[in-house]
Amino acid sequence: MPVYERGYRHWEHSGHRARAPWWAIARRGIAEPLKSRRLLFLLAVAWVPAIVKGGILYFTFQMGELSRLIGGKWTDIGPRGFLTYLGWQSPFVLILLAIVGSGLISRDRRENGLALYLSRPLGVRDYVLGKGAVVMFYYFAVTLLPVWALCLFGYLVTSGATGLQMLLLIPLQALAYCLVTGAGFTLVLLALSSVGQRTVFVALWWVLLYAGTDGLAKIMSLFSPALEILNFPGQFLNAGIVFFGGEPLCEVPPAASLLVVVAYALLGAWVLRRRIKPVEVVA
Amino acid sequence: MNVAPTTVAPAAVLRAERVSKWFGEVIAVNDCTLALGPGVTGLLGLNGAGKTTLFKMLSGLITPSQGEVLIRGHRLRRDVGLFRHVGFCPESDALFDWLTGREFLMLMVRLMGYDGTEVAARSERALELVHLGDAADRRIGAYSKGMRQKIKMAQALAHDPEIVFLDEPLNGMDPVSRREIVALVQRLGDEGRCVVVSSHILPEIETMTRSIVLIHRGKLMAEGDITEIRDAIHDRPTIVALTSTEPRRLASSLAGRDLVRGVEIDEFGRVVARTDHAVNFYRELPGWLLAESLPVDEIETLDDNLQAVFDYLVGG
Amino acid sequence: MQATTIAVKPVAAAIAVQDLTFAYAATPVLQGVSFSLEKRAVGLLGPNGSGKTTLLRALLGHLPLKRGAVSVMGCDMAHDARGARRRLGWMPERGGILPGMSGVAMVAYLGELGGMPPTDALQRAHEVLNYVGLADERYREADTYSQGMRQRLKLAQALVHDPDWLLLDEPTSGLDPRGRVSMLELMRDLAANKGFGIILSTHLLADVREVCQEILVLRQGRLLSHGRVEVAPPGATAQFLVEGFGDEPVFLAALEAAGLTATRRERLLEITAPADAGARLVLAAASASGFALRRLQPRRETLEDLFYQLVDDAGDARSKD
């Protein structure tokens, strides 16, 4: 009869596979907010516009030719209409990412937790990738996912080939758009989170950047329409024209807006590179 | 278990009479009576035992909810002039980060009521005492933890007080600075000052003094010399280890003695004896060993050190 | 465990540092540090700002090395820091908590990041928290832990992936006497009974004495010395330290009559006597004079002696601090 060691025992590897470090970080970051009922409620509310859009889709397909008479932005079931839908989602993106993303890095910095991560066999890239995946997940949850669900719904309820044709490219267009803008939002938000010590301030800065520039640019553009370029979320949406086609949403050319998005992403990446280091240089 | 004060210093410089302090429902210090004479006294306790509160009451920073602190028989609360006799080095380090060490010290000395040349001279002397060296002219904001401790100590000593309170003065210091400060504390005690010092590192307290005050959950648990306190803990037999080339013979010989309660041979091959009458045991032991020509290379009492006393009283 | 055979290169030393040099901006922190360690408990001592923490970070592969080489268990830190970190556990001095998680969740998560399968990580997290004495608090949020519990939690996260070496930065900082003793016991157990290599960076010689037999001393970024506490070879005479009570002048006279010299060192008497019969002569003098002996010990070189000797030898004993 063996008597086992009562104190410290060495680890016996079970032989199961370990997760990639970035995936372990992402899982943890995604699962954590889902414990909150309020966040689940917010996610549910964020899908309400999709239900409305689904209704529009349904009636348009049912009414066939008749729908042409109604027309307009709201009932557009083409690619341009989906970009409008993504515009509706903007407030949800603002709030959800503020809740989920502000603390991702700032909390780790507060108690020197970042150093704990980097004392493990993983690099700065794994860390940022893992944290970024969390933001991307929630961004997709209220943008790309509803669009895909709507398209699927559309395929099911449409009768004619025109409907199918209309919806055919939208999932891919949405994917491209959401990947680019998601990366932009993620890098900017993570950069803010890596700069701020306190999560509340990070959230505040994010809201200021997102909603503040929106309001400011609307006022400024009364004097010069090109100043709409200062509108942070507005530029992200306007860049969607590049993917979905149609008339620009403001006086700024969509290609220029796309460049602005890329610039934001690069700026975020640059800040992250400077802020996420294993050893902080104390002057 | 309570150990009665074994010695009451005849010339008590500092006395606390039944002092208590509570904050709302929290009682930090509960009915402590103390008399401290010249020399170094170690103040010990676990975190939250009430050490810092006791420090602040003894030095007059806060007023007891009940009871009285007396310095040379004068009530601290009544006589503001008594503060001149007291130096306090607090545990927290909220300092003026934008001043240099020297500026800070001169400011503190000036606040003490000294003027002109006196300020510079006293500051200089205090800086020398703590070995701050050329760091004195750097900003405190750039100080390491150890340097901050030193400037706090200099501030407590600059006005040459008769009573010095040092709350965790060694915290964050490196070994070399520790040795300097330990020597300084010993010297202050030898000069006849009443020095009260606290530290979590019990071996360090032991190098500074044999005289301790132990508080636990706000109550005074023991006061006096470590060895005397140890001997007063009657319900724990004293444990003495003997190293011998003939452990079996030694063990059986000891087992036959009335003064010995039990004998065993430990994992290092030492003979470990327990006795309830330590004083007599120590006195008789050399005779026994010589009479039976039992070879012994080493005699060591395992539980008369501060750590053991602390564990017995606080329940390690 | 999967039956994979790995060609193991024989390594002379578990940790080898060659001419390690590092500077933050223009401030040199480590200058030409070289040493090699076997898997043992080693105390890392030095004044504030002497580069102790930076040296630990170099062993974790966190420093961009311009000069010098660091090799940990055969992994060259310039190329394979991750491989080494898999087998290193680090306990930082400051912080070291992931807010918003329970103790067990944090340890399991960091175990997973240490390359463990999720289920193994969770099981081990419970085990190590048990070992460090946090069994009852493991479901509480780590933010609410007291300082003593935090230190234990930090040790648990360093142990969860069962590393070969533990790099401990001031592990007893902020602990009260009870917490300190139990932390020292854990470290001693890990070093002596569980075969861990430990680098213990601390200000407290008393801590090092409890855990280590070997010390590294850094000062102003240079390795001052690297030494072990050796047992001195027996000489013709030996020093004995004696503590006791009774009629001391009579005892001293008895010692003198036996040809022994005694000097007082604070509360101890240091007696020089022939090495072979020393203890016996002291006992005889004590017995004859009715002097009670609490302590009779041959004087040995202690870690304190070694440390101060090293520091003093290196020129002025004044530290930078």
Image (spheres, helix red, strand yellow):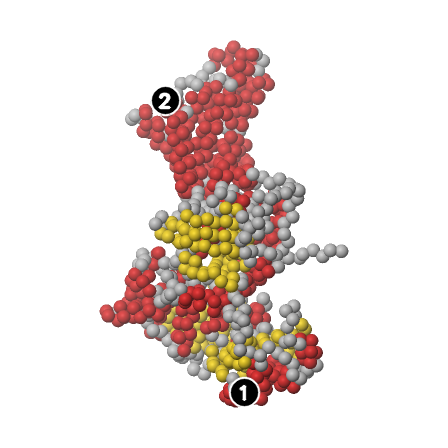
Q: Chain of mark 1?
A: C
Q: Chain of mark 2?
A: A
Mark 2 lies on a secondary structure that is loop
Please name the amino acid that badge 2 sits on. Answer: Pro
User: According to the image, label 1 marks what residue?
Assistant: C258
Measured as percent of width and height from the top left, residue C9 is found at 57, 47
- State the residue in front, C220 or A283: C220
Categorize mark 1 by other alpha carbons within 10 Å: few (<14), some (14-19), many (20+).
Answer: some
**Image height check: is A159 above or below A19?**
above
Mark 2 or mark 1, whichever is nearer to me: 1
- State the residue in front, B148 or B115: B148
Q: Which corner quadrant of the image does residue C288 belong to? A: bottom right
Image point (41%, 25%), residue name: A239
**Residue A253, label in figure:** 2
Q: Quadrant of the N terminus of chain A?
A: bottom right
User: Is there any visible trace of residue B65 in the rendered image?
Assistant: no
Q: Which corner quadrant of the image does residue B248 belong to? A: bottom right
Image point (43%, 45%), residue name: C64
Gap in Å between the C-alphas at discs 2 and 1? Answer: 106 Å
Image point (63%, 69%), residue name: B268
